[in-house]
Each structure stands twice: as C-alpha cells, then as structure tokens.
Image (cartoon, rainbow, N blue to C red):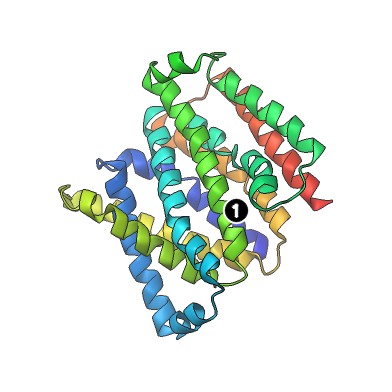
Amino acid sequence: MGYLKIISAILIWSSLGIFIRKIALPNYAIIFYTATIAGALQFILLASGGLLRTAWRAGGDSRSALLLVLSPICFTANAMLFYYAFRHTTIANAVLTHYTAPVFVAILAPLLLKEKIQRITWIAITLSSLGLWFILGGKTNLSALLQGDGEHLGILAGALSGLAYAFLILIIRRIASLYPSLFITCIQNGIVAIILLPFAFRIELLWEQVPYLLIMGVLHSTIAPLLYVQGFRSVTANEAAILGYAEPIGATILAFIFLHEVPGVSALFGGAMILFSGYLIIKARMK
C-alpha cells in the first residue's frame, strides 16, 4: 500500500507542468494562490486535530526555528525557477534538468551537514554535467546561453531549480525529526503566501483560472505530499527516491498526450544521464 501511495503522489506531481501551462497568470501569482489554498487547508487539518500547538511546542532550538523559516525561501526559489522552465522549454526538459537535485545534495551535504563526500559523487557530477550539456545542445558558453533564446534559459532554470530544491531537501532533513511534516508544509505555505502577497494582489484573477488553482492547492500541494509522507510508513526513503524517477516518465507522457510535445533524442539521452547520476547517488546511500 505504501508503494501505491508514493507512486500516486509522484504521478500527481508529474501533471504539474500541464497546469502551469493552462493558467494564464504570472508564476508568482500561481505560487501565491496555491500556497494560500494549501496553507489554509493544512491549518484547518492541524487545528482540528489539536496538532498545531503540540507541533510548535515540540520544536527544537532557535536554529531549527530559523531553518523552518528559511525553507519557504528555498521553496519559492525552486518553484519560480521550475515554473519558468515549464513555460520556456519542454516539460520533459524542465523535469529532467530538475532531477539534478540529488547530485546537488551530494555536493552540498559535506559542506552544510559535514557528511563525507563519496567517490561516486564525482562520477555523478560528471554524468549530470554531460547530460545537461546534451540537453543544451552542446553549448558551453554561459554568457551566450544567458543571452540566447528562451529555450536555453528554461533549461538552465530547470537545473537551478534542482539546486534550490537541494537546499530545501537539506533543510527539511535537519528539521524533519523535530516537527510533523504537515506542520512544516503549513508553515512553509503560510510564509510563501505572506512573501508573495504584495506582488500577487495586483494581478486580476479570472473565474476560469480558479478551478486550476484549487486543484493545485488541494491535489498537488496537500493530498500528494500527505500520500507521499504516509507511504514512508512501509517504504524506505531510498526506495521512495528511486520510485520518484517515475515523475519524468509520467511528465513526458502527459506532455505528449495533452500538449503534443515530443522531446528530442539529445534531450532524452542527456536526461537519461542526469537520472542515472541521481540513481548512483541514491544507490550509494543504500549501502
């Protein structure tokens, strides 16, 4: 049952790019509204179960509280970059480059968590870098890429979203044992909504956009994370990480069905290298 819950959550997340393309709103407005909807729903769930006060009192020291507040900043950076990638390159490219996150975690963990760097990390860095090079079409001049078309900028944004997500993973790893996951997600969404409120309230919201935002707030930002966390009761973290590689497959299939997007051969080859580099990192952690 745990495997089914995790796969269900992953398949829900794989449809995210479709929704971003369907909503004619700036990315920050989408993030604001979905965070507000999800945060309000999660607050109700915490309050009705009497878990809100208990979770706050069970927290750790001031450093843990600071990390709890910093996580929404990483989340916002990840979402802004990821959504930009969805809009400026193919969904397959956006998701595949986002999966550089495990490699970034392996690079940053020795610096931030004092973990020992493994030999396999250098192989993974090389493979993921080559994979990104293939997706970029063999271009290596950064200034040319930054001045290039939106396609290349979207690919770079996807990779940078993987970096932001890596920071988020490392923060969550530090505080996951101190706070309930629903509480962390609720605080995260609440702070994101407060940060983006001054920018989002000036954007006109049309009624036809509301159903998409409600689905994202309820399905993608609340139900999927709850399913994912519940799945951990019978599935190990490493197994869940490996199951996560169903997301780029699902996203590519959905993009083909709904948007008629077909990724190129070089993009698929480069994406496969990135996914394999992440798999090497996960496999090394399982030993």
Against 253, residue 179 (above or below) is below
Q: Residues within 10 Å of mark 1 (few under 14, many from 20)?
A: some
Residue depicted at x 42% and y 38%: 81
Camera sees residue 214: no
Q: Nearer the viewer, residue 218 or 60?
A: 60
Against 127, residue 40 (above or below) is below
User: To which quarter of the image does residue 210 belong?
Assistant: bottom left
Residue 12 position, x and y percent, is 49, 52
64 horizontally vs 105: left or right: left
Camera sees residue 16: yes
Mark 1: amino acid: Leu
Q: Nearer the viewer, residue 112 or 124?
A: 112
Residue depicted at x 64% and y 44%: 108
Residue 4 position, x and y percent, is 63, 60
Q: Which residue is mark 1?
A: 170
Residue 283 position, x and y percent, is 78, 45
Taking the view exactly as shown, the residue that stands out farthest to the right is: 287
